[in-house]
Amino acid sequence: MNFISDFDWGIVLRDAGVIILQLILIWIAYGILKKVGKRIVTRAFDKMQQNGKMTEGRGQVLERLMLSVLSYTLIFIVIVVIFGIFGLPIGGLIAGAGVVGLAIGFGAQGLVSDIVTGFFLLAEKWADVGDYIITAGVDGVVEEIGLRTTQIRDYDGILHFIPNRNIENLSNYSRGDMRALVELGFSYDHNIDEAFRVARGVCDQMAEDADIVEGPNVDGVEAIDNHEIVLRVTAQTENMMQWGVQRKLWKALKEAFDENGISMPYEHQVNVVQKEG
């Protein structure tokens, strides 16, 4: 009891107040630096995109990566400063970081593989945000490429998180013009030249479509099956527009064939009945 009564609580409260004030100032400084750094990084990448030095998708990928690096760096600095306030040795923190790094090297090879692969994904420009790709059994639009995972949203709206180490082969459908391909069958009862004429008329009308870069063209007869003649029509389209152009071609060709009396094929079945005598 004498120890408690003789203890100088004024000094304790004063020191505690100083520490709390320092922590508040550190938090405020962290928020200001993070906001200013984010603004600088965003403006820098916007300027590079405006000058044509970087594509929009590429800029989004690298901007998010730089913001993550900035955030982790500021957090590490804050931790170091807090160690200094409480009089804890900073060398212990650095040694701890070395131990963590060693543990990652021996016990988390998958994480290291993710980071290495993610680095090459970014450095070699395999894909950018907004590209339509197929990789690791998933096809969809890239929403984010990080050092550890790549996020892809598929046609159904499902967001897939793929560890970068699983990306061994990647097919990018967003590099250059794409091809819309339609194969339409018609019956043997109709003249091939007449079907060509109708299909060419549709192609001439569709050539005005803003999504079509070149064509459409009637390539010719693709196949002759047991019950149909298959006609192929192709067109070069803007990126990501090939599916929409294919649907328009299907509709226009079917309507034109109906108007000209060219019927679609169907399987025939012949029954032979033999009577005795």
Image (spheres, helix red, strand yellow):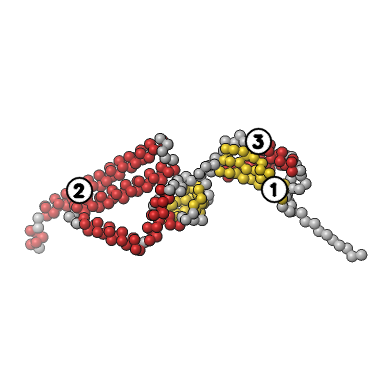
Asked if 109 appears above or below 198 in the picture, the reply is: below
Quadrant showing the C terminus: bottom right
C-alpha separation, residue under disc 1 versus residue under disc 2:
78 Å
Distance between the alpha carbons at the discs numbered 2 and 3: 74 Å
- Give the residue at x 50% y 44%: 175
**Residue appearing at x 31%, y 50% in the figure:** 72
The residue type indicated by label 3 comes to Asp
Query: Is label 2 in a helix, a strand or a loop?
Result: helix
- Residue 135 percent location from the top left of the image: 49, 53
Mark 1 vs mark 2, foreground winner is 1
Q: Position of residue 229 (x, y in %)?
A: 72, 48
Where does label 1 land, which residue?
Answer: 230
In this rendering, does residue 179 appear at all? Answer: yes
Q: Amino acid at mark 1?
A: Val
Tag 3, which secondary structure?
Answer: helix
Q: How many marks?
A: 3
Q: Is 214 displayed left or right of 95 in the figure?
A: right
Q: Residue furthest bottom?
A: 276
User: Which residue in the structure is indicated by mark 3?
Assistant: 204
Give the residue at mark 2.
22
